Image: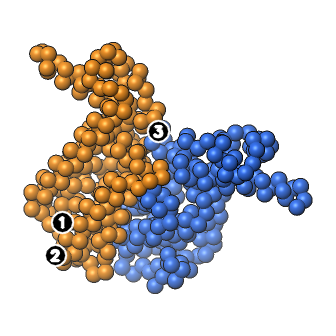
Chain colours: A blue, B orange
Amino acid sequence: MPQQDRAYATRESILHAAAEEFDRLGYERTSLTAVLARAGLTKGAFYFHFASKEAVARALIERQGELWAQVRETWHASGVDPLSALHGMFAESADRMAADVVLRAGVRLAADREIGYPGVPSAHVGWEKLIAGYVAEAAERGDLRAGVDPDAVARTLCGAALGARLISSATTACADFPARIREVLGHVLPCVASSSWKLSGSQNAVDGRAEP
Amino acid sequence: MPQQDRAYATRESILHAAAEEFDRLGYERTSLTAVLARAGLTKGAFYFHFASKEAVARALIERQGELWAQVRETWHASGVDPLSALHGMFAESADRMAADVVLRAGVRLAADREIGYPGVPSAHVGWEKLIAGYVAEAAERGDLRAGVDPDAVARTLCGAALGARLISSATTACADFPARIREVLGHVLPCVASSSWKLSGSQNAVDGRAEP
């Protein structure tokens, strides 16, 4: 393996090993020793790539941020109606998180830094605004029931997604997160959408079959 | 004040001061020094009542457990239909938590011990079972739409309540938790209930007016 590829592989193996620990234990209780043991690396190899545990955490948080931007872009480009795009983004995000510990750890680290401490959780406030924008767009198209408040729908979906992830993470290492998020969408969207709205786009059901 | 009353008052002031700190910072980051400063008490006075920070935390967790049993009992005795009882219990719990830091801290401590760490979150699993029981009872009475899975509804409500509490706690010290929980109920219950079901019982809206 050329030196550059080897360096890349080592960096990825550190990120992966750290993600495994962060995902299970959170930031505080993750030890660098455990990460090194998991990756089969020396401290020297680690410090060649990262200055600290904090630097690895920041790399994981950054990576999940990039992925969400990509998921949003894909669904924006798909041209489906806003409620279907919301459904697609939530479901795809849950699928990816269930499948990828690196992504899952990044999401947990980002959320843990906001939730449970005094101070404004800017990312969650940002998510609520983003989702409210989609729901408001649905309202303009006549896809929303009369009297439904887009901001309230955004608050419900954001909170439900956060709670579903936490319970799913604690019970099944997020294996049932895709199913839980689809249950949330199935319990909320038909309740707030107008009767003429129909889910569209290439939506994958949790077992891989297309949804009706 | 007789000695017994004074001892009771001191114990309560410790619980209250500790609750203020636990509610803001969680267990790990709460220091006994800050609790004592807040209560205006010496270490000696503290240790007369509690053996440790852990002992205060356990007292707060126990107290919130007793309160939920009481809320359940009240709604059970009210004789309203199961979905209305669920609505009432969720809303009343949120109202009480917004108003009472001792209760709020107990709930946070209990949840923090389960969420975010490997291991089965037994309380959340217990809540899901309890709620699923109410929804299953509603199904038997014909209050549920055909095809709705009571277990799935319980998972959605439990996750949504947890997420709503966490976001509300981080943004408004739970001041908007009553409004958020009613939004969740308003977005989910009409979607899963049969068209003939109507909310009944003495339900207080978030601003104190009776709900329609």
Element under disc 3: loop
Q: For residue A117, which numbered disc appears in the image?
A: 3
Q: Could you tell me if the residues under marks 1 and 2 are in contact, i.e. CB atoms within 8 Å?
A: yes
Q: Position of residue B31 (x, y in %)?
A: 43, 26
Q: CA distance from mark 1 to mark 2?
A: 9 Å
Q: For residue B82, which numbered disc appears in the image?
A: 1
**Label 1 Cα neighbours within 10 Å, binned few <14 / some 14-19 / many ≥20:** many
Which residue is at a point 56% across and 63% down the rendered structure image? Answer: A97
Q: CA distance from mark 3 to mark 2?
A: 43 Å
Q: Could you tell me if the residues under marks 3 and 2 are in contact, i.e. CB atoms within 8 Å?
A: no
**Label 3 Cα neighbours within 10 Å, binned few <14 / some 14-19 / many ≥20:** some
Element under disc 1: helix
Residue picked out by circle 2: B141
Residue toward you, A126 or A10: A10
Query: Which quarter of the figure has residue B50?
Result: top left
Specify whether B137 is left or right of A124: left
Query: Which quarter of the figure has residue B133?
Result: bottom left
Dots 1 and 2 on the same chain: yes
Which of the chains bears the disc numbered 2?
B
For residue A171, say whether it is visible.
yes
Q: Position of residue B2 (x, y in %)?
A: 11, 16
Which of the chains bears the disc numbered 3?
A
Q: Position of residue A12 (x, y in %)?
A: 73, 56
Dots 3 and 1 on the same chain: no
Amino acid type of the residue that numbered disc 1 sits on in the rendered structure: Pro
Quadrant location of the C terminus of chain B in the rendered image: bottom left
Which of the chains bears the disc numbered 1?
B
Residue toward you, B110 or B177: B110
Element under disc 2: loop
Amino acid type of the residue that numbered disc 2 sits on in the rendered structure: Arg
Which residue is at a point 14% across and 16% down the rendered structure image? Answer: B3
